[in-house]
Image (cartoon, grey):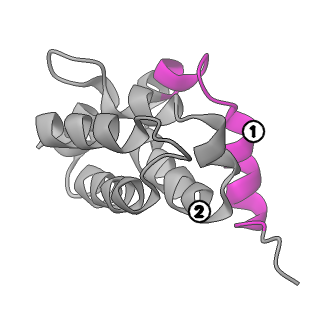
Amino acid sequence: MLFIFQHLLQISLQPSKTTFNKSLLAQCIKAVGYFAVSSDYTKAMCAFGWHQSSLLARLAMSPFEVINDEEMRCLLLPTLISILDSSPKAVEVVRGEFCLSRLLDFLQVGPITTHH
């Protein structure tokens, strides 16, 4: 599964003429989130990987366009939280790649919507 998720993320984050493949990326982020919470073993595999960079690191290095997109951010942040939950070592994996204050803000106030 990790191999499949790695390649799906790679494909969906490849720049196209206009933007990333939002639909594929959204489905992949959701699937990784569900996979991560299925057991402590799968959470650890997402955080630390298996013979490759981890899914956590790849998600944490998502392009600005992904993080700035409200819909994608509302998928990405809970997925990151599900992998980071109760794992100080996993937090260390992303500390240099992702602004952890975004996760804290998300947990405190929930998704910030731009709709009126």
Q: Please determine whether, in this image, residue 66 is positioned above or below residue 72.
A: above
Q: Which residue is mark 2?
A: 74
Examine the structure image and report whether residue 107 is included in the region drawn in magenta.
yes
Q: Position of residue 116 (x, y in %)?
A: 88, 84
SS category of the residue bearing label 1:
helix
Q: Please determine whether, in this image, residue 95 is positioned above or below residue 17.
A: above
SS category of the residue bearing label 2:
helix
**Residue at horizontal 59 percent and vertical 21 percent from the top:** 97
- Residue at mark 1 to residue at mark 2: CA–CA distance: 15 Å
Q: Please determine whether, in this image, residue 4 is positioned above or below residue 32.
A: above
Q: Please determine whether, in this image, residue 8 is positioned above or below residue 27.
A: above
Q: Amino acid at mark 2?
A: Cys
Question: Bounds of the magenta span?
Answer: 91-112
Is the residue marked by circle 1 packed among few (<14), some (14-19), or many (20+) residues within 10 Å? few
**Residue at horizontal 29 percent and vertical 24 percent from the top:** 48
Q: Amino acid at mark 1?
A: Ser
Residue that extends furthest to the right in the rendered view of this protein: 116
Instruction: First in sequence, mark 1 or 2: give its number.
Output: 2
Q: Which residue is mark 1?
A: 101
If the image is split into quadrants, where does the N terminus sit? top left
Pick the front one: 56 or 86: 56
Examine the structure image and report whether residue 41 is included in the region drawn in magenta.
no
Q: Position of residue 82 (x, y in %)?
A: 42, 51
**Residue at horizontal 70 percent and vertical 31 percent from the top:** 99
Residue that extends furthest to the bottom in the rendered view of this protein: 116
Is the residue marked by circle 2 packed among few (<14), some (14-19), or many (20+) residues within 10 Å? some
Pick the front one: 64 or 55: 64
